[in-house]
Amino acid sequence: MLTKRIIPCLDIKDGRTVKGVNFENIKDAGDPIELAIEYSNQGADELVFLDISATNEKRKTLSELVNRIAKNINIPFTVGGGINSVDDVYEILNSGADKISVNTSAFKNPSLINDLSKRYGTQCVVVAIDTKFENNDWYVYLNGGRVKTDKKTIEWAKEIVDLGAGEILLTSMNNDGTKSGFANDITRMISENVNVPIIASGGAGTMEHFRDVFTVGKADAALAASVFHYKEIEIPILKKYLNAQKINIRL
Amino acid sequence: MKVAIVKYNSGNSCSVSFALERIGVSAFITSDIHEIQTADKVIFPGVGEASSAMNFLRENKLDKMIVDLKQPVLGICLGMQLMCESSEEGNSKCLGIFNQKVLKFSGDNKVPQIGWNNISNLNSALFKNIDEMEYMYFVHGYYAEKSVNTIANTSYGLEYSSALQKDNFYGVQFHPEKSGMKGQQILKNFIEL
């Protein structure tokens, strides 16, 4: 049986791992390769690298980093952050990434999703959605959560799947950083209304939260950063717990 | 030992090459027919779309060359699917090394299948030191039917061929290069065939 996936996320700035809360007080947290190897050895099912470098020039170091990651780890990984064109993606996939993730650029130019899936296949196109609940509905936000749109999240999710998204990375801004659990309601709503895998993100604080996002939220994968970085939750212990809770997991 | 990785428009050749480096095998990535023909082992990787991949292989005369190879050949993911009779993806006629068709997943399951799934009924030297129900990493929207060539099964809504073998030709639907230490073992087994 296909298993549910546990995915640590690493924020990358100028080729280094950084840790911070809500993109503030960012501190250098070392070499991404070392952390990636550690997560991989602990049993992470995949990794996500999110490049938060400010300038395009600094992003050039990204493909070199992707190359080093691919040389050193033997599990799949996704690279996101600042991808605007089909050509940006060629470089990243050709350096050894398995999937790429797009967000704001895809919202502003939806045909990018179509172009990417035609050129590289839907399986490597992850579309990330930052969503916030307000006025009784979930809406799409852009630019790392700074720009609100009028688009309802459920509508955008259906559109991107029609355009060729192979997977959706759904981050709830209401939950992100709170450690109070994932947004199971919107996760479930998206998961039941589109036919591609959903990676839930934002809000992980305890092992029970992971259980709930799989059972209640119907997520296919769960992503988290700080609980893993700060070793509040250890991946092998989490996976044993989920297995004991009868959730299908790779031990 | 000369290991050639076939370079074409749908490869994840660099990931495969890195995985081989990790087991101490230095491979070369090439679309040169002579270089491929004279290699000891040939790996035919693939990530992408079937019809455009087949067009590229035909235009570059790689299609007939692959079918005529006599050394062990390992197709990975799309590479394995292209070694089958035909694919529903883009209604493509494929290389016809394995007899079965490649069909699109249907039913309630999410497509593509993305993640770790079990392989079972293992029946090939390719799976030396690999346990029944071991997990491998899969990413695909189309699957190969079961046939006499099937050497491993996987279930996703239905049971399909997650590995195939006929004579010197081997194919795996999963990505051994991304399947941790066990995937690495399968690549090692292939190199040692």
Image: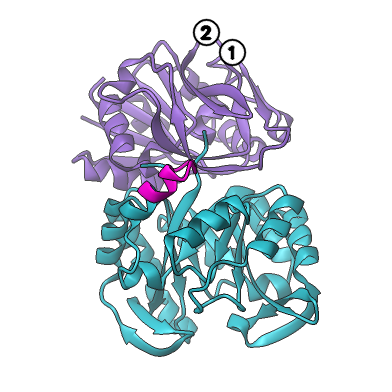
In the rendered structure, which disc, 2 or 1, sits on the residue that comes first in sequence? 1
- Magenta stretch? A240-249
Q: Secondary structure at mark 1?
A: loop
The CA span between labels 2 and 1 is 9 Å
| Residue at point 67%, 38% (across, down) | B109
**Residue designated by label 1:** B99
Q: Secondary structure at mark 2?
A: loop
Asked whether, in this view, residue A56 is left or right of residue A17, the answer is: right
* Quarter of the image with the C terminus of chain B in it: top left
Colour that chain B carries in the picture: purple
Up the image or down, B155 lies above or below A102; here it is above
- Image label count: 2
Please check the rendered image and state whether residue B141 is part of the magenta-colored stretch, yes or no.
no
Residues at marks 2 and 1 touching, judged by CB atoms closer than 8 Å: yes
The spot of residue A251 in percent (x, y) is: 35, 42
Asked whether, in this view, residue A158 is left or right of residue B48, the answer is: right
Please check the rendered image and state whether residue A245 is part of the magenta-colored stretch, yes or no.
yes
Residue B183 found in image quarter: top left
The chain that appears cyan in the image is A
**Residue designated by label 2:** B148
